[in-house]
Image: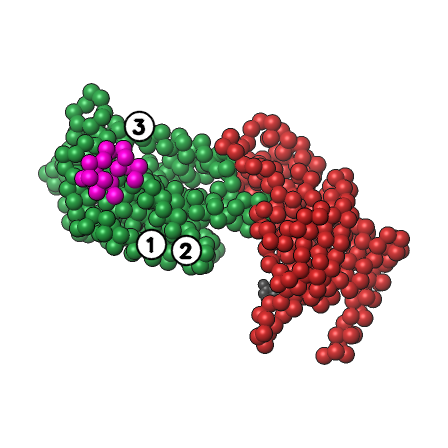
Chain colours: A red, B green
Amino acid sequence: MLEIRAARKVFYRGQPDEKVALSGLDLTLNTGEFGVVIGSNGAGKSSMLNAVSGSLALDSGQILINGDDITGLPVHKRATRIARVFQDPMLGTAASMTVAENMLLAELRSKTRTLRHGLNARRLADYRDRLAILGLGLEERLNTRVDLLSGGQRQSLSLIMAVGGSPDLLLLDEHTAALDPRTADIVMEATVRAVEALKLTTLMVTHNMQHAVDYGHRVIMLDAGHVHLQIGDEEKADVTVADLIGHFATKTDRMLLAS
Amino acid sequence: MIDFLQTTLTSFVALIPVTLAQSLILGFVVAGIMIPFRMLSFPDLTSEGAFPLGGCVCGVALAAGLGPLAAIGLALLTGFIAGCCTAFIHLRFRIHTLLAGILVMTMLYSVNLRIMGRSNLSVFGTETIFDWVPFVQPGFPLAKIIAVGVITLAIFLALNFFFTTEKGTAVRAVGANPVMAEAQGINVWAATIGGIGLAGAFSAFSGALMVQSQGFADVNMGLGILINGLAALMIGEAIVGKATVWRQLLAPFAGAMVYYQLVSLCLAAGMPPPDLKLATGAFVLLMLALPTLRAARGRQAAAPRESFRE
Ligand SMILES: Nc1ncnc2c1ncn2[C@@H]1O[C@H](COP(=O)(O)OP(=O)(O)OP(=O)(O)O)[C@@H](O)[C@H]1O
Ligand SMILES: [Mg+2]
């Protein structure tokens, strides 16, 4: 379970270009729940995910995972419980290392690293099986350097790396946005399959309203750094793309009036 | 013409064993340059200060009556600390790695002078590790070649093992992509400080061996070592490649051996020693410029040869 309590983050405080990224954001995501986060540019979606992963330090507020306060922990300590896929395929993998080495790094995310040889036969066989699920042929390219893969292949690899070891929380920030439509579909399909099969607690940011309608248990709409609207359970089953866009429209009108 | 070739060749051949011993010793400082540049993407100049630091510490320790091993141990420790300082300055104050290295290197010059109390120190006649090589006459190049050759082999194998372990793979990930490494639970600070520290220890080790080999320590003994080391590294990478971990680790040692023989050949051919740094610098420049030059001749724009963290 993920709890975000009264999270606040202001960039350039007190300067003319002050930006409120998170303004007292509260959110609870239950164990096994798949939340889809939407909101216009600058609404604070990435800031929220970065605050959870630890790469953005909050001004105030708390982050709890399964009841443990992790607000003060650095990124690498949180990583034992949190996995993430970045928007940029280049960020999520180590380009100059092989597919198998990247898989090893991910496997060791929640473990203590020893002075034993890393890539043993048992592990390689395991990686082969797990990559085969994608159907992209990555299982035959375990010794290929990752920078020789396409963006879509890299992002698929990032996904398999992230869902391995069943993290307590999976963070996906527009992880298909940089891909062509067909590859995006492949990666999204693999995502949904893994999240459902492993019952992963997941926060996924997307600008694709169809994805927000089709996937997940709850739609979480952010606006101006806080949760503007949540659509869950039965309501979620009936929601349409037009409904979601409608909620954007009200917000934009209000912004126009306010300015 | 024939005469010239003959004298060049004879003086070169006569110097091969001495040069080989020297290049084996300097292989460690090249490794100390390679680890930051290649394994951690952390272009670092600390070696220019850590090399004489190791030499001065070893010299003073020998003069104070310590054994050759203890003297080397002390040198390793101080070199490690110097490397840690550079890494810490970069990480904590967000100062560019090159500037952090220049700061440490410059400060080390004073430290080295303080340690020795003067600019050079003779330790001729004290016991060295080269005296322990069995069956060969101490003081001859062969003793040095055997001793340092064995150490080089052991360290190469150890490094090769380490960088394929779970911990070693994590350290390489920090060099490949620090953002990703952190997200995979790797402590980027610890890996960087430890890795640059290790590199500093290698450079200091090289300096310490050099002092035991030549019988004196000098605060200026590191002058230009970085560019020499880079040249050696590039030659090594051109010969053995750098596509796999073991090739990358072999490159500094192989490169040092070839590079110093080339230097010896140039000197034998009559190149004035003062011109050596100019020639080496031009060589490194050429190696760095080569991809851009090739691209200009036809193919589209080249990617920059070196890409590092800021
Ligand atoms: N590092 C930063 N420095 C300054 N301002 C920032 C920084 N990161 C985010 N912001 C500001 O905080 C606000 C929220 O940004 P955030 O990236 O969280 O939005 P987002 O919802 O992810 O938008 P998008 O849909 O464009 O990705 C924006 O006003 C942005 O300009
Ligand atoms: Mg964003």
Q: Distance between the residues labelled 3 and 2?
A: 35 Å
Q: Indicate the secondary structure of the residue bearing disc 1.
A: helix
In the rendered structure, which segment of residues is drawn in magenta? Answer: B57-74
Q: From this viewpoint, which residue is outermost toward the left?
A: B3
Q: What residue type is labelled 2?
A: Ile
Q: Indicate the secondary structure of the residue bearing disc 2.
A: helix
Residue identifier under label 3:
B150
B74 vs A235, nearest the viewer: B74
Q: CB atoms at circles 2 and 1 under 8 Å apart?
A: yes
Numbered disc in front, either 1 or 3: 1
A54 vs B166, nearest the viewer: A54
Crowd class of label 1 (few under 14; some 14 to 19; many from 20; radius 10 Å) = many
Q: Are marks 1 and 3 on the same chain?
A: yes
Q: Which mark is residue A131?
A: none
Residue located at (84% from left, 63% from top): A242
Residue A74 rendering spot, x and y as whole percentages:
57, 51
In the image, is A40 to the left or to the right of A57? right
